[in-house]
Amino acid sequence: MRHSAILDIGSTKVVCMIVSSDPDGAIIVHGTGIREYSGYRLGELPVKRELAEAVAAAVHSAERSAKVRVRDISVGVPVPFMEVRSGSGSAEVISKNGRVTAADADILIDNSFDFEQPDGCSLIHSTPVTYVADTIPISGSPLGLPCGILSAEVSHCFVDNHYKDMVNSILGEIGISAESFVSSALAAACFVVPEEIRASSVLLVDCGGTHTDVSLLRGNAIVSCDSIGIGGRHFTSDLCYGLRLPTGVAEDIKRRYVFSLDYGESCERVRIPNEGVFDIEHSLIQLIIESRADELCEMLAESLDKMADRKTPVWLVGSGLGLMRGAKEFLEGRLGRDVAVSMPSVGRLGSVSFAAAYGLADFSLFRMGRSSAIKKTERYLRRTFDWRT
């Protein structure tokens, strides 16, 4: 049984998973390590020492659970450390029978770098967005189609070299090499959003601890992305400041909060260590949380409206808002868009806060070979055609 390891570096926690697949293609989780750390803010790298401690602890915990030694690992790249560029390319179909092959797609992608690549970044993967066979637009994989000229719009994802170098250095200290770097947003969307919905367009909103990432995806490609400097920790800190609460108590109140509920004149009874028991009016908690949520929604609406029309559905993941009851309905009311909050059935750690981790596991198991080499089988090519690593 081949095991794969993934590393999801979030803004407040690090997740390592060691996984394999069963004959039916389901993901089997053999070991998991989760460690919180101080995180990072937009435009800033994490503190290397703190990230290194969290990565080492998460990896070693997963290794102990799975009883295996990790040698190489697939690493997620959060939106703040990623750049997306699009280009157009075409290729003459050169096969003897005039049908599209993987070699034609490779040439098409090579010809699509018709833009200035971002400074200080390295390419991590390229994904065709829309295909045209001669003059006919097609959906899905073009492999095997009769065609003279194959063309496509191609999405190219780049990783910030400072982030990549830091992660490589941290992993090297514990004897692990990064097998690949993968867009966390793209991996999460391909895992949680059904293919028929992604086929047109979908907006992925990942609300984490310190920021919220917004990504527009079409098919298996990320088209554009943005980050907003508000996340779950801001709700907690607002409660701490406004109500003079310890962080742990404020976090507990936030997690039990229900959006838009008519609390009336009811109170929340809280116990503060070494101080006693106090009653806090729910209306005051509601004012604090929903004021911050309104601010986030205003910024989200601006970002979403720039990316796609109001008919494009929104998929919410991450622990910042996705785990709060009533968040879906609250966002739908404020954004005027359909919002979904759901995950495929995975059993263990099946909440939307682990969407990126499972997405990376899906990529590592099914969309690349052991050493990043493309497996030359028709079945594999059909599944992985839209990824080029």
Image (tube, rainbow, N blue to C red):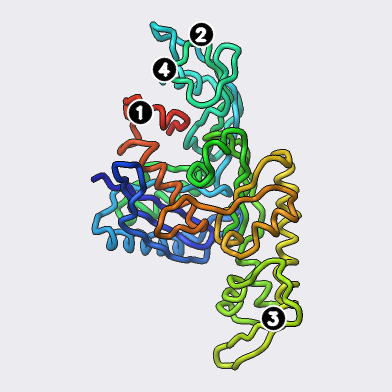
Residue drawn at x 74%, y 55% as measured from the top left: 333
Mark 3 nearby-residue class (10 Å; few <14, some 14–19, many ≥20): some
Residue drawn at x 59%, y 26% as measured from the top left: 87
Query: Closer to the camera, 85 or 280?
Result: 280
369 vs 186, left or right, is left
Q: Position of residue 78 (x, y in %)?
A: 53, 49
Q: CA distance from mark 1 to mark 3?
A: 58 Å
> Where is residue 383, by image quadrant?
top left
205 vs 70, left or right, is right
In the rendered image, which residue does mark 2 sit on? 148
Secondary element type, mark 4: loop
202 vs 384, left or right, is right
Q: In the rendered structure, which disc, 1 or 3, sits on the residue that comes first in sequence?
A: 3
Look at the picture and state if 137 lies above or below 314.
above
Q: CA distance from mark 2 to mark 3?
A: 68 Å
- Image marks 2 and 3: residues in contact by CB distance under 8 Å: no
In the rendered image, which residue does mark 4 sit on? 101
Q: CA distance from mark 3 to mark 4?
A: 63 Å
